[in-house]
Image (spheres, rainbow, N blue to C red):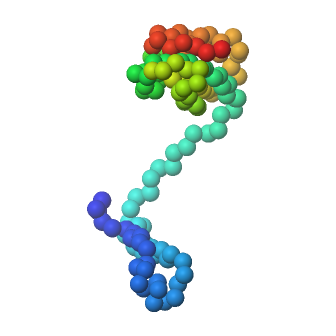
Amino acid sequence: MDSEVIAQFGQLHVQVATKRKLRQDVFIAEIFADRLLKRRLREIRYVPLPKFPAVERDFSFVFADEITFDKIQAAVNAVALAELRSFLPIEIFRGGAVAAGSFSILLRAKFQSAERTLREEEVAVWSAKIVAALQGLGGTQRA
């Protein structure tokens, strides 16, 4: 049953469209409702919207070219901060005031708790741990 075709999609051949004087691309779908309805529905899964606000912090660092974002992310994940919801690169810059063989990266951390509003003091402690982890990779924090 897993390999059974339940729908087909495609574009109308150009020659057929031209013969019918159709000026735009035409797409066709064929759905086999009987086959579709035989399948079990998946359980609906969702995460409710958070009740408490998120706090974001930006970190600007200079790293040697051999340091990848995977290494940066692994170092931050090793800190194991339960309230860290995301850690993403926002901007990467090479050249200018950044020395050859290195790059500048702007990183954004998002912290959030499902139980309460976060306090500035605890976010500062977590931020310091992230900075220490990034410095452990040889990164230099930019002002």
Viewer-side residue, 83 vs 130:
130
Quarter of the figure with residue 51: top right
Q: Is residue 25 visible?
A: yes
Quick check: 106 above or below 18?
above
**Residue depicted at x 42% and y 67%:** 37
Q: Residue at x 47, y 74 (%)?
A: 27
Q: Residue at x 44, y 57 (%)?
A: 41
Q: Give the percent coordinates (x, y) of residue 43.
A: 47, 50
Q: Position of residue 76 (x, y in %)?
A: 49, 19
Is residue 52 placed above or below 18 in the rendered structure? above
Which quadrant of the figure has residue 34?
A: bottom left
Which residue is found at the position 47% from the left and 24% from the top? Answer: 73
Q: Quadrant of residue 96?
A: top right
Spot occupied by residue 136 in the image (x, y as percentages of width and height): 47, 10
**In screen coordinates, is 134 left or right of 16?**
right
Labels in figure, total: 0
Question: Split into 4 quadrants, where in the image is the C terminus?
Answer: top right
Q: Is residue 48 left or right of residue 25?
A: right
In the rendered image, is residue 115 in sight? no
Q: Position of residue 2 (x, y in %)?
A: 30, 59
In the picture, the quarter occupied by the N terminus is bottom left
